[in-house]
Amino acid sequence: MAAYLLRRLVQAVLILFGVSLITFALLYVLPADPVRQIAGRAASAQTVENIRHQLGLDQPFVVQYGRYLLGLVQGDLGRSYLQRTDVSTLIAARLPASLLLMVGAIVCELALGLTMGLVAALKRGTALDQALMVGSFVGVSAPQFVVGLLLLYVFAVRLSWFPIGGYGSFSHLVLPSVTLGILGAGWYSRMMRSAMVDVLRQDFIRTARAKGLKRATVLFRHALPNAILPVIAMIGIDIGLFMSGIVVVESVFGWPGIGQLAWQAIQRVDIPIIMGVTLVSACAIVLGNLLADLVTPFIDPRIKLQ
Amino acid sequence: MRAFLASTVAASALTLALLAAPAAFAEDKAAAASAQAGEYTPDPDAKEGGAIVVTYKDDVSTLDPAIGYDWQNWSMIKSLFDAMMDYVPGTTELRPALAESYDISDDGTVFTFHLRKGVKFHNGREMTADDVKYSLDRVTNPKTQSPGAGFFGSIKGYDDVASGKADHLAGVEVVDPSTVKITLSRPDATFLHVMALNFASVVPHEAVEKWGADFGHHPVGTGAFKLADWTIGQQLVFQKNADYWRDGVPYLDKITFEIGQEPIVALLRLQKGEVDIPGDGIPPAKFREVMSDPEQKARVVEGGQLQTGYITMNVTMPPFDKKEVRQAVNMAINKDRIVQMINNRAIPANQPLPPSMPGYDKSFEGYQYDPDKAKEMLADAGFADGFETELYVMNTDPNPRIAQAIQQDLAGIGIKADIKALAQANVIAAGGAKDEAPMIWSGGMAWIADFPDPSNFYGPILGCAGATPGGWNWSWYCNEDLDKEAAKADSIVDPAKKDERDKMWSDVYGKVMADAPWVPVFNEQRFTMKSKRMGGADDLYVDPVHIPINYDYVYVTDVQ
């Protein structure tokens, strides 16, 4: 177990290194010049070169990347070109909001997805089953931008049940969580349905029924735990989906998380922020996957980590 | 440049005021008289107190006046800081601010500012001439990385500071605690405008030294408001500066800026009464709906804007090296149709300067839309069968649609243009490379003037100085004779000769249009929406300088 963990951690570091190298290289070859954005239109060529030199952007790629890595291993994510603040400060200020949204979204997608999947499995082959599966398909395919605006319009503007965007209270959290959760709910409902259908076919369920147990007991004591655990283990893998989702959802709802930060930075070629958010997201994804793998043997003792 | 940073905002069309301003003042005779004297008559109906909510989509990056150059922080900085000069609210007319008065030497190279006494920074210390010198040294120091440093290029000693050879501007001299003498290396008619820019704001050295690079998050100025709270990425709270040196203003006690709100969400919240000013304006998709609802339309203020949207033709790339070809293109573009396409949020243009800019030539006719004649001219120039070219454009709405309209118009005279829709930064990079972009539609990056002076549309975007790699003169037009004329116009410093100077600038732009490196397409109008309870003259909501609105002079009607 310890050896496995060590190996995975080394892998994780290598992945992060790879991500940083690729992102840095992509930003390096970008034709847009961040110095021009900083210097402004009134700047003379000399001012531009001055700034370029101060930021070390006149150095060859290897030196620039080396410097970045050197800072990185010391926990320094650099300084935003345009916000003139440490990237770590900016991310730290926004990370709690993104994490909160992620928790909200996980609760939403599990509650929605598992219920839908369960009902669909029990009503297999009926119109309800088909309707739910079509619903999940729509949930998976609908652009989050559209879902978000739709929810905003119906529940915040028309019905006034929730505030129109913003941050600060539980009611602010609901709509963005649902928007983000609908996508995952689509996946989960399908996984839950097939897992449940699978379990219900197993011999031990037939035995339980044959023993004369109540339907509810069979379902909730015997079938559900077996079907639900593998599904829940997927949450770790979901984090990648969340990371791409928050960029859109946070913008629609004015949610002050790192997705919004990334979006603004991309538009303005603020390379240190883009790098920082990319690395933080990559970290989250790698950790999520690792977590998913570590949890699996506890859920299903047949699986052993090697 | 502000337009450039606030790309989508500018693209979706907002802003500036001037068009209506002179007329509005003429109606009010008292105001007209005082405006001429460079003064402002306070609004007799103004009420003190109350708080408003303003929203913006993008983060406020910094409130450091030496650095801030965004759509959203421009006006905020104006309310936190003051400079030697500013403008009569709602107009483009200069008035003294931290300077009580000023003298200009006869040769136009020495400006002496006499400071107002008893002006205090938010930290309680009195502002002196040393602070003025410190602030100018700071903004021009390359270590500050100010996007506005170049504006101070006419101050003597600027080159030494810019190149790192000196720490202080030789031309800025503290005569006594309330007098600053600034010597220029050449006469500069725009210098008073420069001294009204945010970049010329006076900052206290002890606060800058205390916070270092974080001064932008802990601003200390002399302005009408002070920063009370800032939650990064969420909101900023401005509190009234009770000790403000101008009597009677500001009216509001508090302004809350909520950040990260999409314009469409801001509009919905405005309709519910949760927001007073959506800082990014009316989203294009909602524009028709708002304007067709009388109740909402009544709360929209329309004004001119110191902005021009144009097509550049790279004069170094054949066939645009032929003047006749460029003129033909000028006649081929149906500007009325393009304006209609963006819901009449602009007016057709025929010259580089916008109508609200001094020096705008009302009698200038430009190139009339005449595709038949354009075709003829193209044939005479040897392109009877047209040619193929590329049109670069920023990839956010409405720019690709506008580019398609241009493409169709060009096709009408036989020019086949491929549209290259790219991210803003990439279009700018292509424009700054000599042989890359034959044509560029400037929308979303278009020039919004930094100060209301005709010279502002020339140097970097039409002069030889801008025609360098990485520059902003995307047509690479360089006419040295015109550069000389421009320099001559800018050496006329005497305010009494302003009309003469404006006339000279009109001539310069007239000659530019004869060479036709641009197709001026339209001047965006600005539309500011406000909540029902907002009070104050319309001019304040489309202030040409305090963009989007003048926070110091607006008020709410529902207090007391």
Image (tube, rainbow, N blue to C red):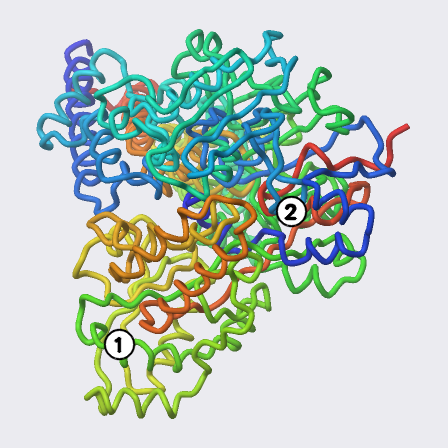
Can you tell which quarter of the image residue B260 is in?
top right
Residue A59 quadrant: top left
Quarter of the image for the C terminus of chain B: give it. top right
- Residue B91 disc label: 2
| SS assignment at label 1 | helix
Report the residue that reaches farthest toward the right.
Answer: B560
In depth, the one of B161 and B547 nearer the eye is: B161
Image position of A147 with respect to A218: above or below = below
Image quadrant holding the N terminus of chain B, namely top left
Q: Residue at x 26, y 30 (%)?
A: B159
Kindly tell me whether residue A232 is visible in this rendering.
yes
Q: Toward the viewer: B29 or A136?
A: B29
Q: Chain of mark 2?
A: B
Q: Position of residue B147 (x, y in %)?
A: 37, 34
Taking the spot 56% from the left edge, 62% from the top edge, the residue there is B355
- Left/right of residue B132 with respect to residue B125 in the rendered view: left
Residue B461 against residue B322 in the figure, above or below? above
- Give the residue at mark 1: B323
**Placement of B126 over or under A78, stated as above or below:** above
Answer above or below: position of A38 versus B9. Answer: above
- Image location (x, y in percent) of residue B294: 79, 62
* Mark 1 nearby-residue class (10 Å; few <14, some 14–19, many ≥20): some
Q: Which residue type carries mark 1?
A: Lys
Q: Nearer the viewer, residue A299 or B296?
A: B296
Camera-side residue: B551 or B403? B551
Farthest front residue? Answer: B106
What is the spatial separation of the Cα atoms under label 2 and label 1, in whole angstroms?
Answer: 38 Å
Q: Secondary structure at mark 2?
A: loop
Relative placement, left or right, of B233 versus A82 is right
Q: Position of residue B364 (x, y in %)?
A: 50, 73
Q: Quadrant of residue B136?
A: top left
